[in-house]
Amino acid sequence: MIRANRVTLLAGALAVALAGIVRFVLPYEQEITSLWSFLVKLTPQLAAIVAIAWLDVEWARRLKMHLVAIPAVFLAFLLYFVPKTFMAAMDIEDKSGTFEDLYLHVVVFVPFLIVALLLAYRLGGGSREGVLRTGLAMSILHVSGLEDLVAVSMNRRLDAIPEVWGWADHITVRIGHPATKYEAYAFIAAHVVVALLVLFVPRRWLRRRSARPQE
């Protein structure tokens, strides 16, 4: 069991350790001040994706792990994320909390959702390649700026899409300055294209390219 799941155990332990560092060691705040801190905050979910991808499906099936893990994930959502969201919103309303508190709560939920979906897929017999492809694609979309675009589009307080996206730190630290509206559009489009390539480029194309003799 240990040998078959050694990558899962190591990557899983690493994911937990990295999550602890991100939550309790590094500054836990809404603002992203550097590319380094942005990348570090992504490492727990990337390690978790690797852990799920290398899970021994046959072993998990023999233990009927899907009957425990999937309801446990649902209960984590139901008993933590749902009431915590309500409490954060109520704290903002009575001014005992801030929007940053709600933001940081939602930021935790997104990688949790990615990992939960991948775990359900893998326990249902999904392939290692499928986990890696969908996990990487979702991670790319996660940091693409799509959510920012939808949020400002839904914001009734705004008359139009802002000309400069100064709040989008995850974009700022990667391009070196606050993105203009059209830079943000290009940034989002590039990420969506890359995510689609990750999902749909056939493996045989990659093999053919790697097998091509070097000139």
Image: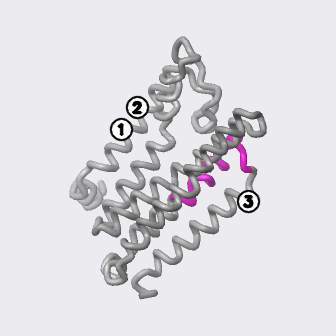
Q: Which of label 3 and label 2 is nearer to you?
A: 3
Residue 21 lies in the magenta stretch: no
Q: Quadrant of residue 32?
A: top right
Q: Which residue is mark 2?
A: 189
Q: Which residue is mark 3?
A: 24
Above or below, comparing residue 198 to residue 74 in the picture: above
Rendered location of residue 74, percent (x, y):
46, 60
Using residue 138 as the reference point, say whether residue 96 is left or right of it.
Answer: right
Query: At numbered mark 1, what does the secondary structure look like: helix, strand or loop?
Result: helix
Q: Quadrant of residue 80?
A: bottom right
Rendered location of residue 1, percent (x, y):
41, 88
Q: Amino acid at mark 3?
A: Phe
Rendered location of residue 153, percent (x, y):
48, 22
Above or below, comparing residue 1 to residue 114 in the picture: below
Q: Amino acid at mark 2?
A: Ala
Nearest the viewer among 50 and 201 is 50
Nearest the viewer among 106 and 17 is 106
Number of numbered discs overlaid on the protein picture: 3
Q: Main secondary structure of the magenta part?
A: helix
Q: Which residues are magenta?
A: 28-45
Q: Earlier in the sequence, mark 3 or mark 2?
A: 3
Residue 33 lies in the magenta stretch: yes
Q: Amino acid at mark 1?
A: Val
Q: Is residue 31 visible?
A: no
Q: Distance from label 1 to label 3 (Cα)?
A: 35 Å
Residue shown at the point (56%, 52%) measured from the top left: 81
Query: At numbered mark 2, what does the secondary structure look like: helix, strand or loop?
Result: helix
Q: Which residue is mark 1?
A: 193
Q: Quadrant of residue 124?
A: bottom left
Rendered location of residue 24, percent (x, y):
73, 59
